[in-house]
Structure formats: C-alpha cells, structure tokens
Amino acid sequence: MAFTTRSLLWDKASHSRELLLSREWLVTNGLGGFASGTISGAITRRYHGLLIAALPAPHGRMVMWSHVSEFLRFADDDVISLGAEERAGGQLQLGAADFLHEFRLENGLPVWTYRVRDLILEKRVLMLHLQNTVHVIYRILEGEKRPRLELRPAFFFRHYESPVNEGMPAPYRLSAIEDRYEISAPDSGLPPLRIKLANDRAQFTVLPQIIHQVVYRIEQSRGYAYEGNLWSPGFFHVDMQERTMAAIMGSTEEWGIINVLAPEAAIAAEEERRAKMLDDALPEARPGFPAELVFAGDQFIITPAGRAEEAARAHAAGDEVRTVIAGRSRPRYRALFGSGIYFAHLLSLRSRWTHPKHVSGWRKRRALSHRRRNSVVFSRA
C-alpha cells in the first residue's frame, strides 16, 4: 500500500541525461547500513553501493556490493542494457536513459519503471530492517514477449570512507552450495557476502571479469581519487517466460536468516512496519509531505551494531540502544528531486522518542519539556 509517492517521469527527449546521474536515492536498514546510488544505476560517490553493511568493530560500514549490471536478452543477438556505468576515457554507458519511464519514491523506497518495446518492467530496492540484507526485485507488469533477465553483480570490499582505489584487492574467493553463493576476501576478517537469486531454475555462469577504471564522478569533482576497479565472478540468468518476478538477494547475515523472508514477504513486512510508523506519528504528520518526512526521519535512527555492553545495560533497564546519523546523510536527502528535507529526522524523533506513550518517569517529564521548547522545521529549500 502506497502512503506517500514522489514521482519523476522521465522524458529522454526533453530531460538532460545528467539528471539521471545527479539525482540520488537512499535506503537504510536501521543498523547504520544502507544502499544508495543514482537513478541511472551508475555509482558516482565512494559510498554508493547496493549493500554497505554495518559490521561490528573493527570493520564498521563496509562496501560489500558495489554494482549490478542488468540485461534483458530477447535473443542471442538482441540484448538490452538497463544499467549504467562510467569508465575512464569518457566511456559513459547509460542504458537507463533510453528505457526509463518513471522513478518514484513509494513510502520513501525507490521504484523504477522501464518500458522496453511492449514490456513494462518494475524494479525495487529494499533493505530488511535490522539486517545487512538487500533485495533487488524485478517484476514484469505487462508484455507478451518475455526476455531472459541477466544480472552481473560486481564487488570491491572496502570501508565506505576509503578512497575508491583502496580496499581489499580482487579476485575474491567464490564458493557455491546448490543455489547459494558466497564471495569472501581471505584473511580479511570480514564475513562473506552471501548472494542468491530467489527463483527456481535460476542459473549462475562463472565468468570472472575485472571491470577496470570505473569513474566516480562526484569524487572527481571534489578532488579525490576517482578511478577504481570492480570484480565480478559471473552472472545470474533466469528465463522470465513463465514468471513475472525475479529477485537477487545480497547479505552478510547467515543463510538461516537470509532465507526467512522471501522478497514478496519482505515487501509486505516493510509496508507493515511503515504503516505502524505513521500510526505512531503525531496526527498532523500522517498525510502528505509530513508523512514523507516521517519516512525520511526513520533513515537517521539506528540501532548500532557491535555495542554489546551498551545493549546489555539498555536491555536490563527495559530500553534499547539507539542513535541518530547526521552529517553526510544530509546532502543525500537534498539530492532527492531537489527537495531539501533537512531536519526531517526531528519530526520522527518528536513522534517516536518524545511522545509520552513511549517514555516513562523522568524521561516523560524531560520529553514533555523538550516538546514545549522545540518546534519542527520543514524545509523545501
């Protein structure tokens, strides 16, 4: 169910292709991990990627899954690319510009709609709450001639603040058990990235490739290192003739946790969580733009990974450890459709942390005092 929607209809004849490279999206998992990128699919910042996992110390936030190349294969010599990447020497591949119909934020989550001939394909990126798990979900909405969907994931393990040319060098170790694959960096201490396609009869072709000199244009504009390599072990492919949905899942969690929620169940669970979020908000924050701020504010609130002592003390007191991300999160929100939503987290803090029903005793008195002293500022600048 869509409580809020913010849409960008793409018209390649009237819109600049740069728009697809400058507009960004962000999805978080409540642990400090996130997925982020541009509408085009190109990675332009050092912290762009489909899975930046929040791992316990000493690792912190690690870029575990950088990019996925997406292809629709209608025949051996008829292949459509939906993704984007920029390489050194001015090589910019922007397949999204030719086939994107709409990008929207639905309940704060990114959704792409592509039109390829008579085919309408929808893509969603979803992170599971309190898990370092991401689902990239593809669904055919219309179309008689169904293609084979091919997905080539690419990786370069590094800390999310490290330069794009510094990290754990490839190749990585690839291991497989049935339909489950693990990519690991030996002697790194990192958990493996576990990845699978959530479909029966999906196949994986081992075809290692180093993607040389990927350009991160925002890093270049800021004067930082801006060229780095990615490594891909091969590609998944699934025939969409007899199905309407396919999803690729990536995670640093154990397989027993990853397999609990299939993609459709994960979507339903996140919709339910966001509906409850609005129920807990102040009445004036539930419809329209204020509801968008509630969803945006939720992205700032995290349960930090690896703080065992703090968590033990908090749980003993009937509470939980939570904190707020600030700083670098701000420009990502301002990038979304040009609508600044700085201070958005204040609305969520006000409704979720300082509402009297969520606190007791001295915390209630402190919260009531805080609510009288503070007001929420909405900015569309």
Image (spheres, rainbow, N blue to C red):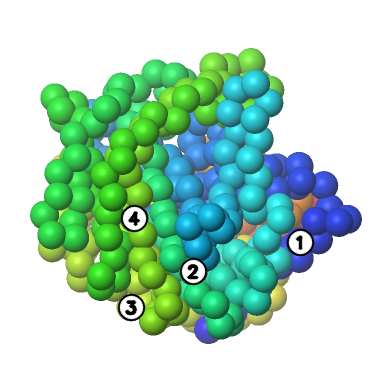
Task: Between residue 113 and residue 220, name the one nearer to us.
Answer: 113
Q: Secondary structure at mark 4?
A: strand
Q: Residues within 10 Å of mark 4 (few under 14, many from 20)?
A: some
Name which residue type carries label 4: Phe
Relative side of 136 to 345, left or right: left
Q: CA distance from mark 1 to mark 3?
A: 30 Å
Name which residue type carries label 1: Trp
* Residue topped by disc 4: 236
Q: Residues within 10 Å of mark 3 (few under 14, many from 20)?
A: few
Q: Which mark is residue 147?
A: 2
Please report the residue visible at 88 percent of the width from the left and 55 percent of the height from the top: 14
Q: Which mark is residue 71?
A: none
* Residue topped by disc 1: 10
Please report the residue visible at 86 percent of the width from the left and 56 percent of the height from the top: 13
Q: Is residue 198 above or below residue 168?
A: below
Task: Between residue 4 and residue 68, name the one nearer to us.
Answer: 68
Q: Is residue 42 above or below residue 288?
A: above
Please report the residue visible at 56 percent of the width from the left and 21 percent of the height from the top: 226
Q: Tag 3 or tag 1, which sits nearer the N-term?
A: 1
Q: Tag 4 or tag 3, which sits nearer the N-term?
A: 4
Q: CA distance from mark 1 to mark 2?
A: 23 Å
Q: Secondary structure at mark 2?
A: loop
